[in-house]
Image (cartoon, helix red, strand yellow):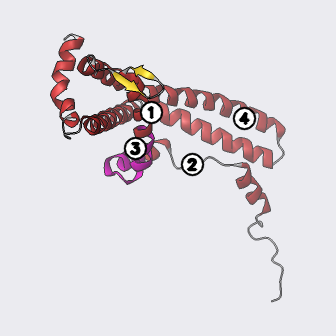
């Protein structure tokens, strides 16, 4: 199937939102919102799919990062420099792997964007978009900022959306219950009284 055929197939599913209002400017704004939202949702679901297809890999590197980071802090608290260096080195390596894996995972959600821009160009190639002080601009100039805004707002709304709340819970279960310690956690642990230690005060 050629690119034109793909855009023709998608056209009925996308163009209706642009025609929902009689005012062409309002209709275009509604259509862009719908296109950005659809692109975001499809991308987020694809990202979740890629994650769960590789869930063992993500769980392994995340657990290694958290475990060795926590061990390095515990070694630091115990003033064991040798153990701290060993654990910290492994934790840094795991952090790097985790970071780049997450970047690749996020990239898997962006493949929809070129299709959205391509369809906009296919549908509105004969329309001149002119903005004050900027002159004529392309459809990507209008779509990309709107997509970024919708994506950010959607990410903030995900905790209250049942499907994405379920996905987040499954990701947390896959990556283990151990929480990444901070230096403040270490300080609190050092300040805490030992179990069974002497208790001062009046009896």
Residue annotated with mark 1: 56
Residue annotated with mark 4: 88
> Residue 8, percent across and down?
17, 19
Query: Disc 1 and disc 2: Cα gap in Å?
Result: 16 Å
The residue positioned 79% from the left and 70% from the top of the image is 197
Give the magenta range: 151-170
Mark 1 or mark 2: whose residue is earlier in sequence: 1
Q: Quick check: is 162 in the magenta stretch? A: yes
The answer, for residue 43, to whether it is visible in the render is yes
Query: Disc 1 and disc 4: Cα gap in Å?
Result: 23 Å
Q: Quadrant of the N terminus?
A: top left
Residue annotated with mark 2: 178
Q: Which mark is residue 154?
A: 3
Mark 4 or mark 2: whose residue is earlier in sequence: 4
> Residue 54, percent across and down?
41, 30
For numbered disc 2, what is the local secondary structure?
loop
Mark 1 or mark 4: whose residue is earlier in sequence: 1
Residue contact at pointers 2 and 3, CB within 8 angstroms = no
The residue positioned 58% from the left and 27% from the top of the image is 97
């Amino acid at each position: 199937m050629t690119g034109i055929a793909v855009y023709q197939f998608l056209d009925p599913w996308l163009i209706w939102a642009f025609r929902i209002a009689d005012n062409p400017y309002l209709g275009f704004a509604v259509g862009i919102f719908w296109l950005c939202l659809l692109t975001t949702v499809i991308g987020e679901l694809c990202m979740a799919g890629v994650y769960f297809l590789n869930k063992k890999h993500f769980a392994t590197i995340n657990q290694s990062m958290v475990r060795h980071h926590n061990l390095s802090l515990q070694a630091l608290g115990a003033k064991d420099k040798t153990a701290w260096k060993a654990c910290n080195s492994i934790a840094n390596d795991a952090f790097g792997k985790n970071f780049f894996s997450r970047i690749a995972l996020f990239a898997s959600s962006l493949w929809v964007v070129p299709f959205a821009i391509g369809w906009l160009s296919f549908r509105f190639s004969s329309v001149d978009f002119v903005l004050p002080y900027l002159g004529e601009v392309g459809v990507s100039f209008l779509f990309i900022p709107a997509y970024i805004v919708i994506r950010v707002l959607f990410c903030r709304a995900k905790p209250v959306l049942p499907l994405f709340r379920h996905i987040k819970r499954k990701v947390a279960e896959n990556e283990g219950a151990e929480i990444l310690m901070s230096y403040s956690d270490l300080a609190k642990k050092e300040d805490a009284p030992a179990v069974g230690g002497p208790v001062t005060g009046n009896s």
